[in-house]
Amino acid sequence: MDKIVIMKRCLINLLILPTVAVSAAMAGVQEPQQLIYRAFTEDRMELWVEAINLLEREYQVNSSTDVLYELTLARYGFIGYSLGVDNRREARMHIDLAEEHMDKLKASKEYEASAYALQAAMYAFRISMAPWRAVFWGPRSMNLIEKAIETDPDNPSAWIEHGNAMYYAPATFGGSKEKAIESYRKAITLLETNMTERHRWLYLNTLVALAKSYRETGNRSMALITYKKALEFEPGFKWVRDELLPELRNQ
């Protein structure tokens, strides 16, 4: 952007912005966050990919930290999905891309705590693909989570990642499903206090994580209540409606 700045910006605006608008119109929504929410609740991951592409193009145009956060959060969610369907190649690509701009997020006062939490998640994702690295990356991930909480105790992402760490870590390494429940509940309260469009899917995902934690600790009734709460928020949430809740009821 250091040569012929004005001309280059004009060309980017002419070439990229119409493409963004057309893509969004073709998808039937106006905003990337709406695409992500539909992708998550309707199990249409092609919409999530479309949202990432839109956010990438938008970031190329204005280099906004707000857009960068939304893009990184979108990658975070898509990485989790990719690992869930055992697409490690896709997961690695998005981890690498997410980490490229993490320093810029950390330098932002508004997103510093979120950046620490997201960086911790990237380590956790890498550990899930190579468990032998947990000895090295596990402490790094936990240190970043603690730093996120210290930086902003009211940051929901920090508590979500603390819950994830407690849920997935073996008891010998400090893991605890009970502690995971506490952290997920705190994150849910924080999300409910300030619900934004970009966090709606994250809220539902955290409710699922909480319900699974209740189930793992033998508290079936609270797991049912939590799944029902997710459906009250979004009746069309296919994952809970068609899979998780029926599975729990049939136990």
Image (cartoon, helix red, strand yellow):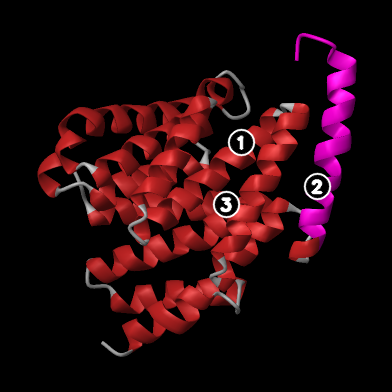
- The circle drawn on residue 69 is 1
Image location of residue 51, percent across then percent down: 65, 52
Between label 3 and label 2, give the one nearer the viewer: 2
Q: Earlier in the sequence, mark 3 or mark 2?
A: 2
In the image, taking residue 248 as reference, residue 206 lies left or right, namely right
Q: Residue at x 55, y 63 (%)?
A: 45
The span shown in magenta is 1-25
Image location of residue 214, percent across then percent down: 31, 67
Between label 3 and label 1, give the one nearer the viewer: 1
* Amino acid marked by disc 2: Thr
Q: Which residue is mark 3?
A: 191
Instruction: Determine contact: label 3, label 2, CB under 8 Å.
Output: no
Between label 1 and label 2, give the one nearer the viewer: 2
Q: Which residue is mark 2?
A: 19
Position of the C terminus, as image quadrant, is bottom left
* Amino acid marked by disc 3: Leu
Q: CA distance from mark 1 to mark 2?
A: 22 Å
Task: Kindly indicate the quadrant of the structure image that contains residue 148.
Answer: top left
Q: CA distance from mark 3 to mark 1?
A: 16 Å
Position of the N terminus, as image quadrant, is top right
Q: Residue at x 84, y 14 (%)?
A: 5
Residue 6: in magenta span? yes
